Amino acid sequence: VQLQASGGGLVQAGGSLRLSCRAPRTISSVFNPSTRGWFRQAPGKERELVASITSRGTTNYADSVKGRFSISRDNAKKTVYLQMNMLRPEDTAVYYCNIVPAAGDYWGQGTLVTVSS
């Protein structure tokens, strides 16, 4: 059940992007109680979890994005968002969404974010 990430693009340092992750094939009784997360993988690096949100809306962030990124969810739309502000060149990566902990079947194609200096 691959998740559909979108919203990436090319942006200058200091700019903003909003990513979306839809789960159209996930039934609400599965989506709503699940913890959802955004991951990213930069060239030559391991995939890392950058933000997560529980069913109750509790959020957690990697230190590298705290204060700049914000994760949210809309259960009615079965969608999770990642608002990224004050982007830096080191944020350049392919961004993926998944449940937390991650499940192999949920990885989609991701969305590429490129931040130019």
Image: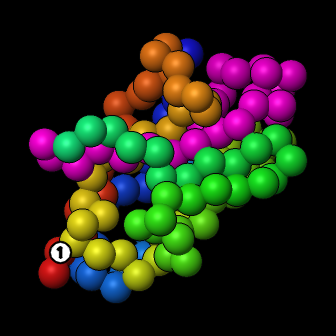
In the image, 109: left or right of 28?
left
Where is mark 1, residue-wise? 116
Q: Quadrant of residue 9?
A: bottom left
Q: Residue at x 70, y 56 (%)?
A: 59
Classify mark 1: helix, strand or loop. Answer: strand
User: How was this image coloured?
Assistant: rainbow
Is residue 90 visible to us here?
yes
10 Å crowding of disc 1: few (<14), some (14-19), many (20+)? some
Residue 32, position in %: x, y?
Answer: 82, 33
Residue 1 belongs to magenta span? no
The answer to whether one can see residue 19 in this image is: no
- Which residues lie in the magenta part? 21-44
Residue 82: quadrant of the picture: bottom right
Q: Is residue 75 above or below residue 99?
A: below
**With 11 as the anchor, is 78 left or right in this view?**
right
Residue 71, position as x, y percentages in the image: 63, 59
Q: Amino acid at mark 1?
A: Ser
Q: Name which residue lies at 53% across and 27% down.
A: 102
